[in-house]
Image (cartoon, helix red, strand yellow):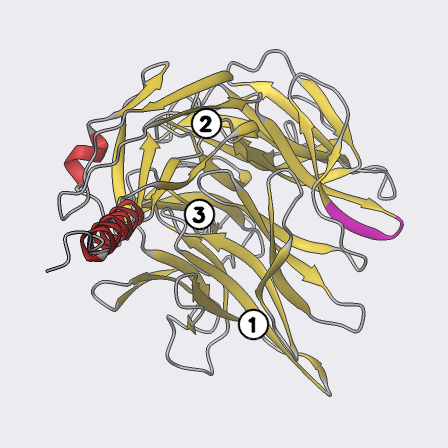
Amino acid sequence: MDRYRRPSAMPRVLAIAVLGLLAGLALIWSFSLPRIVGVTPEGGGASARSPITITFSSAMDRDSVESRLQIEPGTAGEFSWSGNVVRFTPRTEWPSGTIRISFAGGAKTDRGLPLWAGRRWEFTVSGPRVVFLLRTNEAANVWAVPLTGGALTQITNETAGVGEFAVSPDGTQIVYSALRAGGGADLRRVDRDGNNAGDVLLCPQALCAAPAFSPDGKLLAFERYPISSGGQEQPRVEVLDFSTGQTQSPEQDTTHVTRLPGFAPDGRLGYLDATLQAIAVYDFAAQFTTLIPDSSGDMGTWSPDSLYLVYPEIVFPPEPTQNPAGTSQPEHTDQFFSHLLRVTVATNASQNLSGQALVEDGSPEYSPDGGWIAFGRKALSQDLWTPGRQLWLMRADGSDAHPLTDDSFYNHSAFVWSPDGASIVYMRFDVTDPSGPPEIWMIDKEGANARKLITAGYLPAWLP
């Protein structure tokens, strides 16, 4: 028997192995814990409509997440989820200034694992701006100007220029028709600050134009003009699904000429079917199309509650009646007017908002609350006629119609309401000077404080 035999090293080896195993398990467990991967918006220049998003590394228990988000100043809104991303969308626009967000730790995954660390961040909302097209060096691009004045900011930088553009519902992006030097145009997008420009949809052998966002920002309607050896062909409305990258046409008959897409606030798509001389309203859920007669070639505007469409329609005066002496007044069947019709989409019942006035009305735009309609009017009677169409305002039922501008030699169009309904942005040009530049102006709803925002800009839109 050896009293001096050295102790076995096996217990020490086992202890090290166990510790290593426990450390490995702890490491694996720590990596399986949820963490915040990213947040938006952050920093300066955020949109006043921008949603707050938090991206997690794991699927989360939604109640435990939503209850831990705090915002200063306090703002009402709605939560929505897409995979591991939670989105908080404010019901009203963020106020200008700094918005502070605090997300407390303690949220759990859908399997009960804890999120130990919270996060704090902030973003700054600058004042609203107006975006527009401005031609420089023979090419038009999207620019922006602050309502309070200041330097212009170039948003797009396309060598061949931009055709049309649309601002996303949350104000974070702009999609535009990027012209190609050899003809045609592709759809591209850019952040509101001019960064991260990239392709949305390439349109070989075609010109893609007139983009329009759906209210939730998930779909984009546009016009596609095929280009053949004979030149540009008739347009067709298509719809791009951002999530799949696939396009579809709401009109199945490929012989129909369709143009001017515009989404209703409830998500239905309206567009002009020139072949049928009608406005087509397509319901994506029901896959059903409603037709509204329209011979003017103008799509018009949706009411905020999606119940009505208001659009200009050609109206002929009644034939003169014979007087008792057996003679009649001189015929005037060659005369016609442009009146605004309000059509109930569900029933096709219509109301002439212009009444019996001898006028040329057009370019209607509902106020955000639906109470007013801005439109352009030119009187056709000899005592009231003016060369240019003026900006008018009337209530949604056609009452209380009155002018906001009185510049006889300027034509006013392209009306855009501010989100709070307090002001209207518009474009005007001097009808006596065809070579003169267009101008973008802004005026209060009451008709006061008219001021010019930019010379040579056109097709204005609101950038919150």
| Residue 139 or residue 368, whichever sits in front | 139
Instruction: Provide the residue designation for mark 2.
Output: 419
Which percent across, then down, holds residue 144?
Answer: 68, 34
In the displayed structure image, the side of residue 8 where residue 353 appears, left or right: right
Disc 3 to disc 2: CB gap under 8 Å: no
Residue at x 62% of width, y 58% of height: 198
Based on the picture, tell me whether residue 91 belongs to the magenta stretch: no
Nearer to us: label 3 or label 2:
2
| Residue 203 or residue 245, whichever sits in front | 245
Disc 2 to disc 1: CB gap under 8 Å: no
Residue at the limit of the structure toward the left, as seen here? 1
Secondary structure state at the residue bearing disc 1: loop
Which percent across, then down, holds residue 234?
Answer: 59, 75
Which percent across, then down, holds residue 133?
Answer: 71, 43
Secondary structure state at the residue bearing disc 2: loop
Gap in angstroms between the C-alphas marked 2 and 1:
32 Å
Q: Earlier in the sequence, mark 3 or mark 1?
A: 1
- Quadrant of the image for the N terminus? bottom left
Residue 370, above or below 215: above
Gap in angstroms between the C-alphas marked 3 and 2:
21 Å
Instruction: Provide the residue designation for mark 3.
Output: 311
Which kind of residue does numbered mark 3 sit on?
Tyr
Q: Earlier in the sequence, mark 2 or mark 1?
A: 1
Q: Residues within 10 Å of mark 1 (few under 14, many from 20)?
A: many
Q: Which residues are magenta?
A: 137-141
Q: Residues within 10 Å of mark 3 (few under 14, many from 20)?
A: many
Which kind of residue does numbered mark 2 sit on?
Pro
Q: Earlier in the sequence, mark 3 or mark 2?
A: 3
Residue at x 73% of width, y 33% of height: 153
